Structure formats: structure tokens, C-alpha cells
């Protein structure tokens, strides 16, 4: 199976290297900025380009890993090469429907790695769930096969299911990370070391392997300790934006257990 990567950002960088390490041939790497394409292409021994009209038909699967808002624009440009319109073309987005590719390609799908990726930050790829879907059953099988080369958790997930999973993913990943940022900001403002909270963060995540999050909730809002909540809210007057978030989340916890 030969793959061409359209996008050399966070996902392209990790996916490309994982495929390459698993001996999947990467034909071409595209990025809007040539140096980004060249950097990744050098690692995965592929040919770099920053010109979508030079993407050729030598690969079996084309993975579009560009920012969500650019997927359609990129697909339209790729489809100008009629030899690509029958190839398997997938995007890697959690929230964009696979159908956005239908206008340009008959053999479209999705190859969504459900993880947070940052260029240069190591990820343990084997455990990353890959959500696969395709218009044609034959392509589904090929994408499942490709997924299994790089991960032990590959699933057929419909557009509708993926859209819901993406909402949940934003809540558990992006929102919690934002809360870590708020915690870190408060510590910094007060000259305290944020590192002291890291074992607590780790334990909160690790507990999930033992019981559902509902069973693991602790804290003043869970216990109904109104005096403590009042004290915290008073303190957070110096951080008005965080104060309203604190109140909102405390109410959400209280309502969950009332
Ligand atoms: N990052 C994650 O954690 C993650 C996880 C799962 C799925 N995804 C999905 O994977 C896709 C890529 O995300 P990413 O985080 O890898 O994005 P990214 O790091 O921002 O990389 C985007 C890539 O798209 C190119 N690009 C941006 N705008 C473009 C345009 N208008 N026309 C053509 N190319 C353009 C960029 O080129 P230059 O940089 O060279 O300009 C780069 O190669 C998205 O659909 C995202 O939803 C992301």
C-alpha cells in the first residue's frame, strides 16, 4: 500500500512517521509551505511538494491532513487531476463529514486518529484509536488494514458517531487542558509551583481505568460544602473570568449528584 500525505502539520508529521516506520511507502508529502513538506519528506523518504497540481496518481491512498476549513479547497484542487478521482481519498478530521469529499471523489472516506498531536511531541501511536469510514466497502477494508498496521485499536465509525465523539473529545481534552492552564496561571500569579499539582492530575486520569468518572468525582461541589465554595468564589474575585467558570462547573457537578 502506498500513501501520499496532503498536509505536514501536527497530524501529517506523526502519521507520516508512523506509516514510514511500519514500512508503508510514502510517495509524496504536500504542505503549503515547501520547507514543511521538505522537512517531513526527508524523514519519510518521500518527494516534497507545495503545489497540489504536482500530486500524482502513484499512491493507493491519499490522506488529507490539512486544517478543517481547507479540506474542501484542497480536495477541489486535487480533483483537477482526473486520475486521482477514483483513488481512495480520506481526511483526518474529527468534525468534518466525509461527504464533503463526495463532490470530488467517488472513493472517499475518513482516517481519524483520535488523539491530540503536536509536532515534536512524542505519542505512543500503537494505542491511538483510528476511526475509519469509507463510502465503499472495499475501501473500508483497505483503510482498516492500513489502520491495523499502525495501531492496535482501529474501528469503523460513521460520520454521525465521529461528530459526537469529537464533541466528547473536545470536552475531555481541550477543556481539561484549559482548566490546567487556569490552575497554572493562578499558581504563577501567587508565586506557587504548579508542579505540586501534577501527581493529582495524573491520578485523576489514571483512576479512569478503574471506575467511570461519575463514581470518581470528589471536591466541595460533590460534597455540597457550601462554605468552601463560597471561600473559593470570594478568592476568585481577582480572576473574574475564572470565577464564573468555577461557579458554572460547581453547579454542573451539584446538579449531577442532586
Ligand atoms: N492536531 C490534532 O491533535 C488533531 C488530531 C486529530 C485530527 N486532527 C485533524 O487533522 C487535520 C490536520 O490538523 P493539524 O493539527 O495537523 O493541522 P496543522 O498542524 O495546522 O497542519 C495543517 C496542514 O495544512 C496545511 N494548510 C493549512 N491551511 C491550508 C490551506 N488553506 N490550503 C492548503 N493547505 C493548508 C498546512 O500547511 P503549512 O503549515 O505548510 O502552511 C499544514 O501542512 C485537521 O482536519 C484536524 O482536525 C488534528
Image (spheres, rainbow, N blue to C red):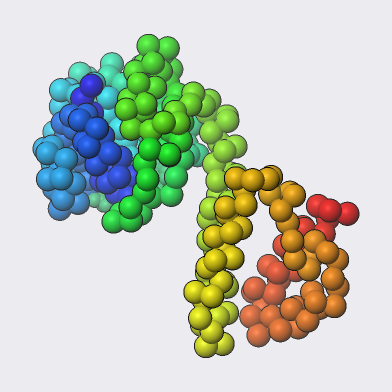
For residue 74, above or below residue 135: below
Picture residue at 78% right of the left edge, 68% below the top:
220
- Quadrant (top left, top right, bottom left, bottom right) of the N terminus: top left
Horizontal arrangement in the rendering, residue 150 relative to residue 127 (left or right): left
- 161 sits left or right of 34 in the view: right
- The x and y percentages for residue 140 are 41, 18
Residue 8 versus residue 182 in the image, above or below? above
120 and 88: which is toward the camera = 120
Relative side of 143 to 179, left or right: left
Q: Position of residue 96 (x, y in %)?
A: 47, 36
Q: Is residue 199 visible?
A: yes
Q: Is residue 235 left or right of residue 224?
A: left
- As drawn, the residue found furthest toward the top would be 138
Question: How many marks can you see?
Answer: 0
Residue 77 at what x, y percent from top left?
Answer: 26, 33
Which residue in the rendered view is the most extreme toward the front?
Answer: 210
- Quadrant of the image containing the C terminus: bottom right
Q: Residue at x 61, y 58 (%)?
A: 204
Q: Residue at x 52, y 88 (%)?
A: 191
Tell me if residue 1 comes above or below residue 111 in the rendering.
above
Taking the image as drawn, is residue 81 in sight? Answer: no
Most foreground residue, 199 or 137: 199
Outermost residue, right side: 258
Residue 45: image x %, image y %?
A: 12, 39
What residue is at 45 percent from the left and 31 percent from the top?
Answer: 153
- Examine the image and state in which quarter residue 230 appears: bottom right
- Residue 217 vertical placement versus 219 (above, below): above
Amino acid at each position: 500500500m502506498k500513501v501520499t500525505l496532503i498536509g505536514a502539520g501536527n497530524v501529517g508529521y506523526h502519521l507520516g512517521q508512523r506509516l514510514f516506520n511500519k514500512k508503508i511507502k510514502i510517495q509524496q508529502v504536500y504542505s503549503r509551505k515547501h520547507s514543511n513538506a521538505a522537512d517531513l519528506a526527508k524523514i519519510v523518504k518521500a518527494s516534497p511538494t507545495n503545489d497540489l497540481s504536482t500530486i500524482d496518481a502513484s499512491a493507493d491512498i491519499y490522506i488529507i491532513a490539512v486544517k478543517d476549513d481547507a479540506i474542501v479547497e484542497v480536495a477541489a484542487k486535487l480533483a483537477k487531476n482526473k486520475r486521482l478521482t477514483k483513488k481512495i481519498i480520506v481526511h483526518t478530521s474529527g468534525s468534518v463529514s466525509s461527504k464533503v469529499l463526495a463532490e470530488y471523489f467517488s472513493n472517499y472516506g475518513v482516517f481519524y486518529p483520535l488523539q491530540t498531536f503536536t509536532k515534536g511531541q512524542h505519542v505512543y501511536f500503537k494505542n491511538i484509536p483510528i476511526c475509519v469510514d469509507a463510502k465503499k466497502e472495499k475501501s473500508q477494508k483497505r483503510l482498516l488494514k492500513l489502520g491495523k498496521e499502525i495501531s492496535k485499536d482501529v474501528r469503523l465509525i460513521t460520520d454521525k458517531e465521529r461528530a459526537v465523539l469529537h464533541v466528547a473529545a473536545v470536552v475531555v481534552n481541550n477543556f481539561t487542558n484549559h482548566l490546567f492552564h487556569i490552575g497554572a496561571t493562578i499558581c504563577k500569579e501567587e508565586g506557587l509551583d504548579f508542579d505540586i499539582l501534577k501527581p493529582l492530575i495524573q491520578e485523576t486520569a489514571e483512576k479512569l481505568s478503574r471506575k467511570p468518572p461519575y463514581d470518581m468525582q470528589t471536591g466541595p461541589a460533590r460534597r455540597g460544602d457550601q462554605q468552601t465554595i463560597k471561600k473559593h468564589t470570594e478568592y476568585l474575585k481577582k480572576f473574574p473570568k475564572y470565577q464564573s467558570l468555577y461557579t458554572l462547573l460547581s453547579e454542573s457537578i451539584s446538579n449531577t449528584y442532586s
